[in-house]
Image (cartoon, rainbow, N blue to C red):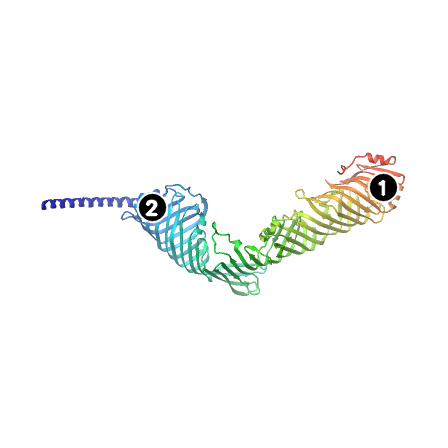
Amino acid sequence: MATVVRRLGRISITLLRRLAWLVAILYALYLIAANVFLNAGFGPDVINRKPERFSMHWQNGLSLYPGQVALWNVKLGGHARRVRWQASAQKIGGHIALLPLLRREFHVTTAHCDEVRGGLDLAEELASAEPRPGGWVLRFSLIDTGTLREVRWGAHTLTTHGAAEFGMWKQLRGGALEIFPSSARLHQLQLRQGDTEWLKDGSASLAFELPRHSRSDAQGWHRLALGRFALALDAQTPAFAVHMDQEPRWRGALRNSGGGRIQADLQLSKGALVPGGTLELSVPLEASDSSGKHWTQQARLNLAVTRSIDLKLDLPPPPDGSGRINADLQLDGLDVLPHDKAPPLLPRVSGLVDLQWRFDSLAWLGPLLAKTPWLQLDGAGELAAAIKLSKGRIDAGSTLSIPAVNVQADVQGQRFSGRARADGLVDSRNGELAPRVDIAVENFQGAPVGDPNAVFLRGKNLKLELRSTGRVIEFRDSLRARLLFDRADVPDLRAFNSYLPGQALRFLGGRGQLGGDIALDAVGKVGKGNLKIQARQARLAVNDLEFSGDVDVNAQLSRADLKNEEFVLDGSTLALRKVKVSDPERASPGDWWAEIRFDRGRLQWGSPLRIDTSASVRMPDISLLLALFTRHKDYPKWVLRALDAGEVNASTRAQMKDAAIVLEDLAVSNDRFDVRARLRLAQRKAQGDLYLRWAKLGLGLELKEGERKFHLLKAREWFEQQPRLLPASR
């Protein structure tokens, strides 16, 4: 029996020795294979199959037993959607669970990192992998470091002596993601952007976790609304120095000298702030002006989380200066990260904002007031506003004031400009908001839009009234405007010649005045209006007939066709007084006058204007009409005696287009005589027919190509046989 036992013992020892040798050989093979894999250079090639999404490189590595790995000088990088990230560590040591590999799970139980740095940058969006079954599971139970050194986001760099713990679970091929409870504790914190220190000498603690979720639950940054986050921060902030120069304009710059402070204690759970959170920020304002005066104030921001989110901001002005912002706002509810159940932020904001600030340019105001750039504000200026907010909307009682600003309004091809004052008010009518802005220009000028230097109009007290209804943010969509000015000086009436039909009718000289009351729509197009022109001793020419006199135009416009810029002209009037013909042989001496009313008519805006109208005329005699056809001395003497026959009334259809004036169906009469005529004036040439009856006498006059021919026999029949210059009115 003893012999058997001894033999079994020798066999067991032999087996153990052989097993030990086998284990030693396998261990040696593992050491060789694993460390060759880690150090021979082909390890990263195996791992980095999709370097555009994930890459990992290291200088050297060591594995002492299966599942244990240590890597030195590690660099990692990846691209997820629109974010490209990088990370590095001086050393990473960790353990990998082997059995989970059998079920396609890569489980790192622990990983300790030294001297950690990381960065994030925005990049072109990389499409996410389409969800597919069978993806490997990555599980990092604990990644920790006691030497977190740097985190960079774009141009911002955070340096620290920190410690962090992180864990996550992720299924590849578009599967779910979970971040285990993680935390970071940062000391000697400093946040820089270039040469600017936004935070320094700070400390912070962070805690965050994200439940397991798939892409169908949330994508991108909306995933943050599913998690829990906590932040405690205490750090110094820079001071802000401002200087007002002689213009005056503010010039500002941050100063890294510090003096400010931020303290925060906030928690976020499933997209909502947790009651009890606070944030306090104070920033020193160091101000100076061109005279050498210096002031120091404190800007403060306070946020308190109660049943609502309460925000207070106080940005004081320097003594004897401007530039104040004071806000007291409340945000209903505690949700701040939008997700399916969270309402948007703006409609939940209520409170008061007082603003007084000087801007280097006020050009940004124009697009808020008008949909198209017909109205522009520009130049440096001070803005004062008292804004009442109710559930995200600017409420009744809000006011706006700009003491001085450059304004420019382009109306029907003319540019009105000057230095203005603007005052705004949000009123309420029948329960609906009625915001308005009144712009007053003390001294203004007018010029063609295409040639702003060709100023033809100068005046005072131009007013631009802007009216709207509904929400202030939609002011420009329902805008109605009114442009008013009176008796603006026109130094040279020839400026109007671009609107007249060339040689057929033109100003030769003189001064005048222009007034307007014009209604505009949201895009600056005229809806209706009234234009008044007054000229005294103006010099005009109709073809080759030159005369002087007083001119009064009262144009009543209402829009007929926006696309073709056509206007109804009904009710407009033209008055001529103290008219004297320059050539004494052309007409009888003495003053002449006419009152013309456009009973029905259309005007198409352009250069020149196009007018088609039916008009009625009152005048003392027909002397000027006869002069348009030929010299008075060319007529028989009995015709000239008709000039003393008394005041007459006339009617005609008049058309002005294509550098010509055409009168058709011209009928003049009183108790003693009748006149019928048609006449076309263009390029200093006249063409037309005239018939005059006085008692039993009749006269026809044919005007063609500068030649005149009288018809004394059967003059009426001759006139009626002549072709019309315009088709008969329908």
How far is mark 1 from mark 2, CA to CA? 112 Å
Q: Residue at x 67, y 55 (%)?
A: 463
In the image, residue 632 sits, relative to residue 390, either above or below, namely above
Query: Which element carries disc 1, helix, strand or loop?
Result: strand
Can you tell which mark lies on residue 106? 2
Give the residue type that dot 2 points to: Phe
Q: Nearer the viewer, residue 216 or 725?
A: 216
- Residue position marked by numbered label 1 in the rendering: 674
Q: Nearer the viewer, residue 168 or 402?
A: 168
- Residue 66 in view here: yes
Q: Quadrant of residue 712?
A: top right
Label 1 vs 2, first from the N-terminus? 2
Query: Which element carries disc 2, helix, strand or loop?
Result: strand
Q: Nearer the viewer, residue 552 or 264?
A: 264
Q: Quadrant of residue 158?
A: bottom left
Residue 362 in percent (x, y) is at 59, 54
Residue 457 in percent (x, y) is at 70, 52
- Residue 38 in view here: no
